[in-house]
Amino acid sequence: MSNDELPRTANRSGFVTIAGRTNVGKSTLLNRILGTSVAVVSRKPQTTRTRILGAHHFAGGQIVFVDTPGLHQPERELGKRMLATAHAALADCDVVLLVADSGHPPGAAEEEVVRRSGSRPILLALNKVDLADKPALLPRIAEYHQLAAFESIHPISAATGVGIRELVEELEQRMGEGPPYFPEGLVTDAPDSFLAAELIRGEVMERTGQEIPYCVAVKVDEWAERADRGDVVVHASILVDRQSQQGMLVGKGGHKVREIGTAARKTLSRRFGCPIHLVLRVDTAENWTRTGKALDQFGYVDPNAEGAS
Ligand SMILES: Nc1nc2c(ncn2[C@@H]2O[C@H](COP(=O)(O)OP(=O)(O)O)[C@@H](O)[C@H]2O)c(=O)[nH]1
Ligand SMILES: [Mg+2]
């Protein structure tokens, strides 16, 4: 029975893994589809570190999107885990959504997604068409046709919203019969404190130079909703993996961490729809990006380890 012949009462659902090289706009696309931010976006590559789930609800069903760390050459233990997470998500989904930059020809990362997708249907989203040179788009699509037998190719802009509705409608059509994985209306399984930590990390990544972003972890130490005042008090630690980086993050007279704090407070207020009282501290967790135990502690699990989900 094809999906279109499903009884009207049947529930449709399925998992769509969003894959591709780093920095092509995978997380921006997920946030755009869901209409709220569940995944951190930044101009720096390798912003997404873990598997992020987001549920898109439609009449008669839902799509569970899995946003993944981009494919890259890992150097440290953290990078290796990020890559393993991306690979595992490709091996375990119903549909693969390959996101690529419409300004670039296909390369090794796109080939690898195709290879790892096996026999799963792959849709291609050619993102950032708002930046693309229009006459170059048709030859670009032709190049991608050479790469694989994609179910379809969607020129989109996750930033402006162009082409998103058509893409989502096709994905909805492709969902077979399945249970509702997420309760009605729930968009992500991540707790508010995790989302807050991620949004703060996004501000750190946007506001620091070359090396710092990859050495930063953010942990929310306290999350207290004050019903009487209608606000939330958030205490968070920004952790770097070497003492020498701590000074750069704090900045002269504390100006850097204050700048990050001001920006993060605004972002959190917008995301959670209430005033946020944010207290940040900066600390060192020596070599956390290179040691398995510290990575476990910060939630960057090894998907191949026993007991990992
Ligand atoms: N101009 C433009 N920029 C985009 C678009 N989608 C994403 N970006 C930017 O590309 C950068 C990387 O986005 P991100 O979603 O973090 O990429 P990811 O690493 O693939 O998840 C960010 O600076 C985004 O604002 C788009 O459609 N157009
Ligand atoms: Mg991302």
Image (spheres, rainbow, N blue to C red):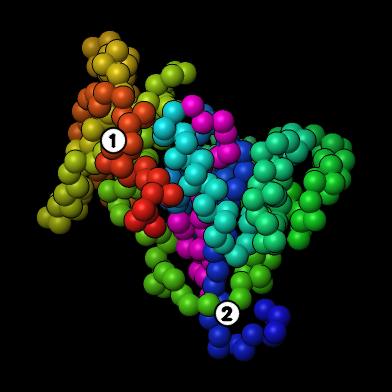
Viewport quadrant of the N terminus: bottom right
Residue 95 placed where, x, y %?
A: 63, 62
Residue 223 placed where, x, y %?
A: 19, 47
Residue under label 2:
177
Name above or below for residue 122 compared with residue 77: below
- Return the residue nearer the eye: 220 or 300: 300
Question: What's the magenta region?
Answer: 53-75
Residue 32 placed where, x, y %?
A: 54, 51
The quarter of the displayed image where residue 309 is located = bottom left
Name above or below for residue 63 compared with residue 67: below
Name above or below for residue 21 compared with residue 178: above
The number of numbered discs placed on residues in the rendered structure image is 2
Q: Is residue 241 magenta?
A: no
Q: Amino acid at mark 2?
A: Glu
Q: Is mark 2 within 8 Å of ligand 2?
A: no
Q: Is residue 66 magenta?
A: yes
Residue at x 87% of width, y 37% of height: 135
**Label 2 crowd bin: few (<14), some (14–19), many (20+), radius 10 Å:** some
* Residue at the limit of the structure toward the top, as seen here: 252
- Return the residue nearer the eye: 284 or 134: 284
* Residue at the limit of the structure toward the front, as seen here: 306
Would residue 37 be seen by someone viewing this image from the given angle?
no
Residue 143 in the figure: left or right of residue 132: right
Mark 2 secondary-structure assignment: strand
Mark before the other along the chain sequence, 2 or 1: 2
The quarter of the displayed image where residue 301 is located = top left
Q: CA distance from mark 2 to mark 1?
A: 40 Å
- Return the residue nearer the eye: 143 or 93: 93
Residue at x 47% of width, y 63% of height: 55
Residue under label 1:
294
